Amino acid sequence: MPQLKYKRILLKLSGEALAPPEGRGVDPKAAELLAQRIGEVHSLDVEIAVVIGAGNLWRGAEGLARGMDRATADYMGMLATMMNALALMDAIERAGIPTRVQSAIEMRSVAEPYIRRRAIRHLEKGRVVILGGGTGNPYFSTDTAAALRAMEIDADVLIKATKVDGVYDADPKTNPNARRFDRLTYIEALNRRLQVMDATALSLCMDNQLPILVLNLWDESALRRALYGEPVGTLVANYD
């Protein structure tokens, strides 16, 4: 039987992963599909933490374009991630998987406060841990929150789930000649300004040697195969 390459993962989801076809809001069917994907991995005894964005509910850039204060827009985004975290928690628990939501912004009647050691203990007990509220600070994206939390919980890899099968040098939906990368160094991803993660998150991963794997979560077998070390998606890491 093949051995798992990654035992503890941080899964970064975009808010759009929960969106209905019209693009805004939370679609229970989308949440159930995500729960199914997470459940398939959980059954392998992989420890799973999740960070989810808020793009399906709130985009700070729209507020900024109308003159909104940046910190206010970012705090609204953090609250929106908590709505997504609760929706995902509900779907995962209905699938029979124990789940905990922790928030970087204190809201005790809704979620536990984020405490690193408690999060790790939940993972060790086989619970999926959803980490909401970003970093708890404005001016930082959920990409950066994912990188930070992945390092705090000592994850083996940060997996960024997308709707394409890796990182391309152009948008494959509009450019049929776009080239997919099987692997990249952090510096290449930064210098090429590829849409892997934002520069702060990439730099944080680079400084701490945390590999980033970009894959298509909607491919039924991609995540499972990746955990066994098969060549799936694009791996961003240091290479000798």
Image (cartoon, helix red, strand yellow):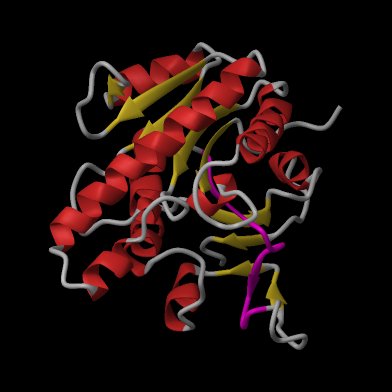
Left or right of residue 200: residue 157: right
Residue 107 in view of the camera: yes
Q: Residue at x 16, y 54 (%)?
A: 72
Residue 181, picture quadrant: bottom right
- Asked whether 222 or 185 is in front, the reply is 222
Q: Which residue is drawn at 31% across and 20% down?
A: 110
Left or right of residue 74: residue 172: right
Q: Which residue is drawn at 70% across and 78% down?
A: 172
Left or right of residue 77: residue 67: left
Question: Residue 233: x percent and y percent?
Answer: 70, 59
Q: Give the magenta-colored segment's residue range.
A: 156-171
Left or right of residue 134: residue 57: right
Q: Residue at x 40, y 46 (%)?
A: 146
- Residue extending farthest to the front is 22
Question: Residue 113: x percent and y percent?
Answer: 25, 23
Residue 154 in view of the camera: no
Task: Decide: is 193 above or below 6.
Answer: below
Question: Residue 144: x percent and y percent?
Answer: 34, 54
The C terminus: image quadrant = bottom right
- Asked whether 142 or 166 is in front, the reply is 142
- Residue extending farthest to the right is 1
Residue 239 highlighted magenta (yes or no): no
Residue 48, picture quadrant: top right
The N terminus: image quadrant = top right
